Image (tube, grey):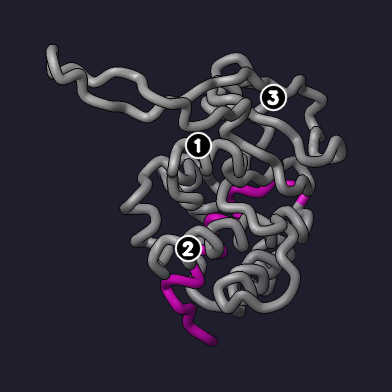
Amino acid sequence: MTSLDPNIKRLAAIAYGEASTLNDPDEISGIAFAVANRARAWGKKTVADLIQADPNYTYAINGKNRRYERFMKAGSTDEIDQDLGMKQALNAATKAWANDGSDPSNGAYWWDGVDFKTNYKNHPKVKDGFKFSDPAHNIFGVEENTFERILYWKVRNRKTGEEVNSKERGRFKAVWLSTAAHGKTIFWLHDPDYLITSGGKAYR
C-alpha cells in the first residue's frame, strides 16, 4: 500500500471530478495540466494555494461532485488502481505537476464542460466574449460571441479633478480563446488582444 502526496492527490481528484464519465485520457490529462499550468504561472502555487486564491476556479470541490469525493476518500494507490478513470487521473496529475510529456490542453489555464452549452446564455465566458482558435474545438456546436470593446488611457481633468478618457489604449473582441477540446471539455486561455489591451495577467 502506497500513500499519496496530498498535492498530487488533490490535483488528480480535480481532474477526475471535472472530467466527464467518458474517462477520456486526454480530457482528464488536459484538466490536470490546466490546473498545474496555472499554478506554475501564478507564483508556483500548490493546488490548495491556487484554490484559496481563486475559490471559484473548480466546482468539483464544492462537496457535491461524487467523482472528486470518491477520489479524495481513496486511501492508497492500490485502491485507485482498481478504477481505470482514477488510475488515469493519478498518472495524469503526476505528469502534469512535473510538467512531463505532452499537454493535451495546449497550455490552457481554464476549462469548461457541458454547462458551457446548457447554460450558454448565462455563462460568464459567453458574457465576456469568446472565440475558437480552431473550429474543431466547438464540440458543443455553439455560436462564438465576440464584440468589440475599446479601452482608453485615463487622465485627470485639471479643472474638475475627474478622470476622463485620453488616448485609445487598445481594442479586443473576446476575453477567452480556446486552446483544445477533448471528451466533453473545452480548454481556454485569455485572448492575446485582451491581455495587451487590459494589461492583465495571463493567469488571472
Using residue 35 as the reference point, say whether residue 162 is left or right of it.
Answer: left
The residue range painted magenta reads 1-22
* Figure check: 142 above or below 138: above
Q: CA distance from mark 1 to mark 2?
A: 20 Å
Disc 1 target residue: 197
CA distance separating discs 2 and 3: 29 Å
For the N terminus, the image quarter is bottom right
- Circles 3 and 1, Cβ within 8 Å, touching? The answer is no
- Where residue 61 sits: x, y (%)? 44, 48
51 or 110: nearer the eye? 110
Which residue is pictured at 41% across the width and 40% down the height? 56
3D distance between C-alphas at marks 3 and 1:
28 Å
Q: Quadrant of residue 118?
A: top right
- The amino acid beneath tag 1 is Thr
Q: Position of residue 138 (x, y in %)?
A: 80, 33
Give the residue number, with chain letter if any, for mark 3: 117
Image coordinates of residue 29 in percent, x first then y, are: 69, 62
